């Protein structure tokens, strides 16, 4: 049987969901028997050079660069999965929704207690090399079509394992109550 | 005859008995049938605010918490259509506020979250509003987080002073509605009433000051079994 190809990305996330993926422990050996990992922070493959079967997306879209990566994933992956609360609803980064970008930047670089006296020149980062903050944080499914959603902060390793093997074996996903959590 | 089960009705085709005057919800509970609720709280008058307990009688949607049983009533409850409707209500409540479960002290003990778990809500079908709402930490015993409030009015209905007056009230109208407590009354809130306010809140909108994440993950109310499992 030809191996299925998995790609992963962390957008506006904390890498906790990727940690949880690694938390499937020695089953990762079983997993690499049936899948190949393509573009992913785990193997540091940075560009798509082929199409993939499954794309796992951690984090929502907070920057224009996140939108770009997410659209690349949609283009190259047959099935896209929102992995974790941030991908599903923005998560903690979305706490800035409702606050203007300028106000966020000024708090972070000018007025916050830890920077108040450190940034005398009152510089806000504005280099063209830097990605641009979006007006708010967007859940992934508000940017591209997402096929599956695995909640949790992070999603339990066993929930990820159940979901991945279900997709690989082309059967219905089993989401047991004890593993289906939002925290 | 006040205590006898003198009315016969059915839920999802199963014949049940109820006392005259009881609501569909109470009658269902007495017969061991789960109907989900959110704004309802035993011991205080029902409100019919959240509509999560909606059932069908003669093809018509009614709230089980406010409708009284009639002889021969045929109630539809645990059907795919009704459960999908209830799930839709839960989803609306999730998108209408800012429900950040990962950072909420009530997570695991929250009735809104528990219903979302029960109905396996992976993602709401509606777009998120991300309303701008405030946290009010100005009171000595409680913290009000309006991001989490679902306007069930439980605190308004259950927390009363010695003269029976509500301590919490609704302020404003429509989308601007929020629970309010007079600062002076909040200052005089007894420990007992403050604890009661926290207890009656189904979500994490009223929390005790200086306390949080007390129960470890795995030991909270809805960690192991869905809401309604006790029936």
Image: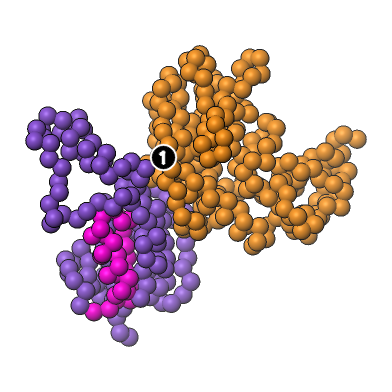
Chain colours: A purple, B orange
Residue at coordinates 52% horizontally, 33% vertically from top-left? Answer: B178
For image coordinates 52% across by 23% down, the residue present is: B181
**A8 relative to B45, above or below:** below
In percent of width and height, residue B36 lies at 63, 48
| Residue A96 shown left or right of residue A147 in the figure | left
| Residue A9 visible here | yes
Residue A160 in sight in this render = no
Q: Nearer the viewer, residue A8 or B231?
A: A8
Q: Residue at x 32, y 65 (%)?
A: A56
Depth check: A105 or B1 in front? A105
> In the figure, residue B5 lies in which quadrant?
top right
Label 1: chain letter: B
- Residue A52: say if magenta: yes
Q: Decide if residue B57 is on the left or right side of residue B125.
A: right
Q: Which residues are magenta?
A: A50-77
Residue A169, image x, y percentages: 41, 77
């Amino acid at each position: 049987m030809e191996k299925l190809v998995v790609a992963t990305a962390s957008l506006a996330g904390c890498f906790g969901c990727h940690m949880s993926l690694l938390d499937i422990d020695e089953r990762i050996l079983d997993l690499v028997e049936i899948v190949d990992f393509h573009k992913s922070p785990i193997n540091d493959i940075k560009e798509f050079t082929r199409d993939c079967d499954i794309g796992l997306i951690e984090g929502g879209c907070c920057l224009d660069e996140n939108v770009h990566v997410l659209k690349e994933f949609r283009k190259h992956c047959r099935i896209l999965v929102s992995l974790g609360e941030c991908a599903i609803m923005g998560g903690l980064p979305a706490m800035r929704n409702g606050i203007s970008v300028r106000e966020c930047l000024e708090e972070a670089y000018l007025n916050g207690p830890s920077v108040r006296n450190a940034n005398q020149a009152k510089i806000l980062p504005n280099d063209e090399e830097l990605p641009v903050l979006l007006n708010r944080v967007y859940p992934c499914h508000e940017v591209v079509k997402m096929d599956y959603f695995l909640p949790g902060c992070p999603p339990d390793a066993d929930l990820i394992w159940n979901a991945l093997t279900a997709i690989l074996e082309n059967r219905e996903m089993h989401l047991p109550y004890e593993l289906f959590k939002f925290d | 005859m006040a205590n006898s089960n003198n009315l016969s009705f059915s839920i999802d085709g199963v014949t049940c008995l109820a006392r005259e005057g009881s609501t569909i919800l109470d009658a269902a509970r007495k017969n061991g049938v789960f109907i989900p609720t959110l704004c309802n709280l035993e011991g205080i008058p029902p409100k019919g605010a959240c509509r999560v307990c909606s059932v069908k009688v003669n093809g018509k949607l009614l709230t089980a918490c406010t409708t009284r049983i009639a002889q021969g009533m045929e109630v539809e409850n645990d059907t795919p259509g009704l459960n999908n409707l209830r799930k839709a209500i839960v989803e609306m409540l999730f998108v209408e506020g800012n429900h950040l479960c990962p950072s909420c002290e009530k997570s695991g003990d929250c009735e809104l979250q528990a219903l979302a778990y029960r109905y396996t809500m992976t993602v709401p079908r509606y777009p998120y509003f991300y309303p701008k709402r405030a946290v009010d930490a100005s009171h000595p015993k409680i913290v009000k987080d309006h991001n989490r409030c679902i306007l069930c009015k439980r605190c308004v209905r259950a927390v009363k002073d010695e003269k029976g007056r509500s301590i919490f009230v609704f302020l404003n109208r429509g989308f601007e509605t929020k629970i309010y407590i007079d600062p002076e009354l909040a200052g005089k809130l007894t420990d007992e009433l403050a604890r009661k306010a926290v207890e009656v809140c189904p979500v994490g909108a009223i929390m005790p000051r200086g306390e949080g994440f007390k129960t470890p993950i795995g030991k909270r109310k809805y960690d192991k079994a869905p809401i309604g499992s006790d029936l």
